[in-house]
Each structure stands twice: as structure tokens, then as C-alpha cells.
Amino acid sequence: MKHQAPKGTRDFYPEEMAWRRHVEDAWRKISIRNGFEEIDGPIFESLDLYKVKSGDGIISELFHFQDRAGRELAIRPEFTPTLARMVAEKAASLPRPIKWFAVPNFCRAEKPQRGRLREFLQWNVDLIGIDGPAADAEVIFTAVDFLRELGLKPDQVAVKISHRDVVKRVLSRLGVSDDAMLGAFDLLDRRDKIEHEQFNAQAQTLGLDEPTIERFNQVARVRINANAPWHDIQEKIAVPDEDLHDLEALHKQLHAFNIADWCEYDLGIVRGLAYYTGTVFEIHEISGAERAVAGGGRYDRLIEMFGGPTLPAVGFGMGDVVLTNVLEDRGLIPDEVAPPVDIFVVAAETAASPLVTQLISQLRSAGFHARQTYRTTTNVGKLLKEANQSRARFFAVLDQNTIDHQTLTLKNLKSGEQTHIHLNALPVHLKSP
Amino acid sequence: MKHQAPKGTRDFYPEEMAWRRHVEDAWRKISIRNGFEEIDGPIFESLDLYKVKSGDGIISELFHFQDRAGRELAIRPEFTPTLARMVAEKAASLPRPIKWFAVPNFCRAEKPQRGRLREFLQWNVDLIGIDGPAADAEVIFTAVDFLRELGLKPDQVAVKISHRDVVKRVLSRLGVSDDAMLGAFDLLDRRDKIEHEQFNAQAQTLGLDEPTIERFNQVARVRINANAPWHDIQEKIAVPDEDLHDLEALHKQLHAFNIADWCEYDLGIVRGLAYYTGTVFEIHEISGAERAVAGGGRYDRLIEMFGGPTLPAVGFGMGDVVLTNVLEDRGLIPDEVAPPVDIFVVAAETAASPLVTQLISQLRSAGFHARQTYRTTTNVGKLLKEANQSRARFFAVLDQNTIDHQTLTLKNLKSGEQTHIHLNALPVHLKSP
């Protein structure tokens, strides 16, 4: 009887794994060069940990279970609670700022659909202990640095940026009361998913009159590329400058980091989660055809919710599933991401076969990726074909001369060049590019 | 309220994570140069999958749960069932031999103790589709290649090797009936954990007389380094040569791979699991003070148990917990495994601060690991101290000259050498070793 991978999960055969490794390696490389240090936590946590941020409502979205002692545990659906717990636990001894990244796997008990699986990978980047727009911009820069590294361009993906305080001030000035503010945010969040009439009807329940709803609608649909002088942007948003000062400060930093052309101000970006406190952003494929590639923002009160000190913090998460969809759509998945093969070693005579084993074991221990055939044939033509299929850079043929004089025939499979060399000279040849 | 990591799990703060990354990277590097390709499967599987190999007894050792549709699922406690499922599913289209490795995390619902946690990493290496001692030796070589890479020596760890068929023939000749064979293997497996009297008593229940029990005991305690001529080894084991031919064939291959000095024959090695069919081995710290670092062997009938074709296979698993304990015991954990920092950039005047942001963003996008201070001070002495703490290779000071003439002061923090250079010349300096 055959078995299958559980619904909503993936098997990574070598080809899929090479791609996953390519993405994970790039996430790590970009994190490190931006000064973040890698961390990780357990694959499961106390179920209670997930209630702190999200309430009891989260439970149905989790895979949860008990251990033999009756402890309630859950497979992690996201990283933030683990991060907050780890910061809270060692806050006193951690150097500031805390610049951490992680590349964990997560599970959610939800219905699988395009861009959403039951198990996925997510890059998490967080800068903790520093307030202000420079930290926000550095975190956004790190995301853009990655997108650029994978070959994406500013006309293919955009970082859509808003700011909670700015939107609050704008809505407040429009007449949205403090009590109605959460409802207004919720309406903003769903503005693209509902009909115009429905939008208006819901806006009315917030106590707004017709002209104000019209104005609210306009603000909700603001989309302005950040690659413009601030004055032009301020004019387009058309709200008093004093309401926008947080966005203006961020604007300066996005220009200092030279990523303004990747960014657009979109006051409709809310990030459903209630814990964000300032800048919020989402990265989207430009056509809007896919779910968000990444999302994040400032969450200055989260660490204290988990028993830690009050610490400003900003970060984002980027999943592998939507990212891969977007890169596929754009033809940006390279044909070959598997590690290169240095040399394919064969014997042209059965007597030389034991020497193949000796040679590949020496080469491997010296750091070379050395392969051999597992067939018994000594037909060099057939073996050359196998070497080419393995994508090896070099092809080495051992024969009676190898036994008698320690020499071998070495063929460069790219240039076609062929030489007879001593075994001792092999590493030098392999090290040449 | 503070929260903690669940019992038996680990938080990986940057220091612990750097070590974990060091081990994982070495596992990958060694696997790849030995011609293995990386794969992975889901973090959870159908609970049924684990019953195929291990029966219902396994359930109490698993963290298991249901999804909303009532499917019984379990967090993976090991990789072999996933591997067998993946091979069975695509057996017809996979190129032979199948040489796969994986570096997944696993969970077991057991009592945490030294060398055993509830969540751990394990390197899995499998060579499928090739029978014979050369494949067995290649897999053992891969493990040794790793141990050597991490600095271990043959006088610190040993690959203890046995062979099921050899032991079966030896026991059979001693008078152990086929019916009593499993009981005899079980007794072999526990020979070091029980008293001599208990051993004798249990051997009697297998229907053996006194002199035979004595002989059985001798065979069970055979420990011979493989770095000797076969004739000497055969003499020490002291059973007829025809019973040992499988071990002799493996012996030749261990010498061809030049790892005989890492190996010892130990006929008491059984590997509790019933599915091994030929060569079996365990890697142990030489004093025997720790649990096995790794274990594996040949399992020629496992793929068909999971609905696949009959395929010979050999492989091993190596966990990170015991490995780390052994390396700690031997003082082989390097002080510094974190990624190097290329440059630390500061402003000696507030007016130059925006240039710091511009420069680090350019350097990072060019592939350099560039850091900055997050403090507002322009005291170069204090900033130099911070740069040294960050272990940066270079220290760059921007000032009015940078604004006026695009020049900066660059200090090599290893040599102490200091130069004034143009901004454009910086990448060339950073690329020098």
C-alpha cells in the first residue's frame, strides 16, 4: 500500500529542495550582510503562548496536542510569539539593538489554496530596541535587498507602506471618533475585497456623512510612488502636512537607503493584526494577482505583552509559497540551482576500479565534489555520457597507466580539452575555474 | 507573565544558532561532495505511516493530533518512513542509484535526558538501489568524512560495525535455532546493559549449554580494529572463514576508502530495529560514555513495506545532540563560528550621518556585510571600540571630507593600518583578504 504526503504539505525531491535551498540561502545571506543574526525556537510551543497575542480564536487555526503529562502544546503557526518570548526571557542581558532573523517552518490547520499551505517556510527579520524611521527603513531595505538579489525589479513588486498614526490622524480629522477607529481600520483593510456600495454602507455606520465617506474613500485609495519629492506626495495625499510628519520622516530614510523606487504609499494598508503601532507595510506583486509576498511593521508594545520590558520593535515575515509563485510568474526560477559537480571518475579497465574508490575518497576529503559511475561497464563512451549528464566539470579516466605510472586522462567537459596528468596534479586542475 | 520553551526543546539564540548552522552546513557540504542530493518531507505525516515499520507501539512515543477533518497526524520522530514513502511514490521515474540526504528536525514524546531531547536535528544519508559492500562502505565513508571535517580523530570516535547475516551464521553454528534467533539478537543488543549472570540466564532460555554460552559471550564481545590484515581479524574472531565472507568483502572496501583506522568490528552491534538486513553500524565516542553519535545499516526490504519495489538500500542517521556533547567533551567547539563582518561605518560629524546610511546600503547590495552604530555619538574613539567588538575587518570614518571630496578614513582592524581613500576605492579594499 502506498502512502501520500498529508494534505497541504510538500515533499521536497532534489529539484524542489535545490530551489528551497536557493531561497533559504539567499534569505540568510541578505540577513547577514544587513547585520542580522540568526536564531530559532522550538517547532512547538505551549498553546497558551499563542493566546497572548491572538486570543482564544487562534486555537482552531493551530495543530495542537497534549504531551503525556497533559501539557497543551501547538505546532508554531508564526514566529512572533516565540521571538517575543525569547526577547522577554533574556532582555536584560541581550546587546542592543537586537537584530535577529529566522528561517523556520510553520504549520496552520487551514484549507490549502494558492499561496497558502498547511506547512510553509517564512523568513522573519526583526530589529528590536531602536525606535524611529531609520530602523523602519533599514528593515524595508533588507526585504528589498533580497527581492533585488533574486532578480525582481521595482516594476514587478512594490512595498506598499502606510503608518497607523498617520491614518488615525487623517481619519480623526475626517470625523471618525476614537470609538469608531477600529471599525474604520477594518473597513480600510477590506476596501479591495468589497463592493463600492458595501463600502459606503459600512462607512455610514461609522457615523460619517456622504462627503466625508467620499473623502475617506479617496484616502483609502491613495497609491503614490515614493520616488518623488515629498512636496508632490503631500499634495497628492491632500491632507494637512502636520498629519503626515511620520510618513515624511520615513520618506527621507527610504531615499537615504535608495529604495524609494521600490516603495509606494498606500494608506489602505492596515495589516489586520491589532498589535502594530506605527509604520506598516506589505510587499505585493504589482498586478495584485497574488497574496502579499511579505508583511510587517512596527510593534512597540508586543514584547511587554510577553512579560518583557517596553521595547520598540519593527520587523516583517516573508513566506516561501507566494514568493515562489511570483518568481515563477516572472520566469525568475533559474534552470539550475543544484550544487556543481567537480569531477566524474571512471575506470577504463576493471583492474583500475579499486583506484577509482581510492581517488574519489581522497578528492572528497580534500573538499571536491567527486562522483563515480555505479555501473560495471568500462565503455568510456557510455561513461562520458553519464559524466555529462551529471553536469561534472571534469571527467577522469583511470586505466593501466594509472596502475603503472599514476597517470590519468583528464577531460575538461566545458572546453573539451584533454590532458594526461599525474594523480598528484589533479587538485591543481580542479581548483582552476 | 513570562513564558518558557516547552520541556525538552531548545531556544537557539545567536550563539547556539551559529553552532547549529556550523554543524548543518558541514552536514550539507560533506553530503554534497560525496554525491548525495538534499531532500525533505513534511514536519508531520499520517500517523499510519509510522505504524508500517514500528507497529502500534510507536504511538505513545509520538506527538500526534487530528486535523479538523479528523485525519490522524503525527510530528515526525524519524526520517526513514518519509524517505521510504517518497521513494515508493516515484520509484519508477527516479534515476538510480538514489543518493539522498536530509537535515530535518524531529520530535519524540519521551523523557528528556542527556543526549535525548524532545526536539532534535538529525542528518540522514541514504544510498538506494545499489547492493553490496562498496555502497555500505561509501555511506560509512561519508560519516567519517564528516567526523574528520569537524576535527575528530580515530582515537576519539569509532565506527562499530557488524553484519546481520554473519552474526546469524555464527549464532546458528553455535546452536541457536532460527526460532531463538531474534531472542539472541536482543540479548546481543543488551549485552553491555545487563550483568554477566543475567546474560547467562537469558542465554540458557535460548536452549544453549554452558560452553556454548561462554562462546556466545566471547563472540558478543569481539572488538577488533579494521586497520589490520584480514587474516589477523579472522583469527581473532575465531569462527570459520566461510561464515565471515560478508565482513571480509566489506573489509576490502573500508580499506579501499582508506577509513579502516576509524572502524572496528563489533559483533555485538545489533541496532534494535528489526528492519536491518545486512551491514549494521554505530558510531560511538571511544570511551563509551555517551549514547551513539550515529547509527545505520542496510535495509533491503523497507521500501517494499511502504508499497514500493524491492530496492536494496543502506543509510544512517546522526543527531545533533550527542554529536555536540562529544565535541564539547573533546574541546572541539570553535570559539567563533559566526559569519565575519566586513566593515563598520561611522560618522565623525553629524552632518555626515546620512552618508553612512547611503554607504552601508550600497555596500550591502554589493554583497558586503556592513554594520553601523545605532548610537548618536560622533566620538570616534568610542565608535572604534564598538567596531572592534563587532569583529569587523575594517572601520570606516566619514566626515566633512566625505561630504566635500568623497574621501574617507579606512582602518584595517587586524593590521592597524590606516589610509585615506576615495569612496569608489572602498570595494577593492574590502575584497582584499
Image (spheres, coloured by chain):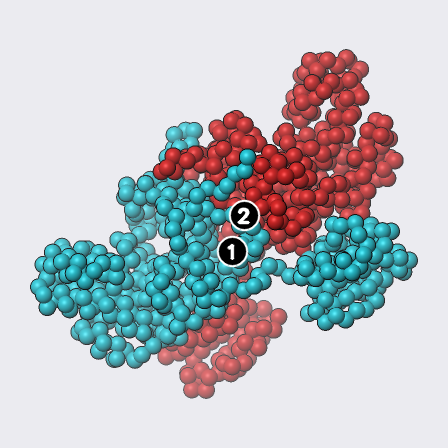
Chain colours: A cyan, B red
Q: Position of residue A230 (x, y in %)?
A: 28, 78
Above or below for A49 versus A131: above
Q: Position of residue A39 (x, y in %)?
A: 46, 52
Q: Amino acid at mark 2?
A: Asp
Q: Is residue A255 visible?
A: yes
The structure residue drawn at horizontal position 28% and vertical position 65%, both measured from the top left corner, is: A162
Chain hosting mark 1:
A
Q: Quadrant of residue A282?
A: bottom left
Task: Characterize the local packing of mark 1: few (<14), some (14-19) or many (20 or more) Cα atoms within 10 angstroms.
Answer: some
- List the single residue furthest toward the bottom: B405
- Dots 2 and 1: beta carbons under 8 Å? yes
Foreground of the two, B230 or B90:
B90
Q: Amino acid at mark 1?
A: Arg
- Left or right of residue A76: residue B115: right
Q: Position of residue B291 (x, y in %)?
A: 62, 35
The structure residue drawn at horizontal position 41% and vertical position 83%, both measured from the top left corner, is: B403
Task: Characterize the local packing of mark 2: few (<14), some (14-19) or many (20 or more) Cα atoms within 10 angstroms.
Answer: many
The structure residue drawn at horizontal position 44% and vertical position 82%, both measured from the top left corner, is: B402
Above or below for B223 versus A392: above
The structure residue drawn at horizontal position 40% and vertical position 75%, both measured from the top left corner, is: A258
- How many circles with numbers are drawn on the protein? 2
Q: Position of residue B193 (x, y in %)?
A: 64, 24
**Dividing the image into 4 quarters, which one contains the N terminus of chain A?**
top right
Q: Which residue is mark 1?
A: A20
- List the single residue furthest toward the front: B92
Give me the C-alpha separation between circle 2 and circle 1: 10 Å
Residue B40 is tagged as 2
Q: Quadrant of residue A137?
A: bottom left
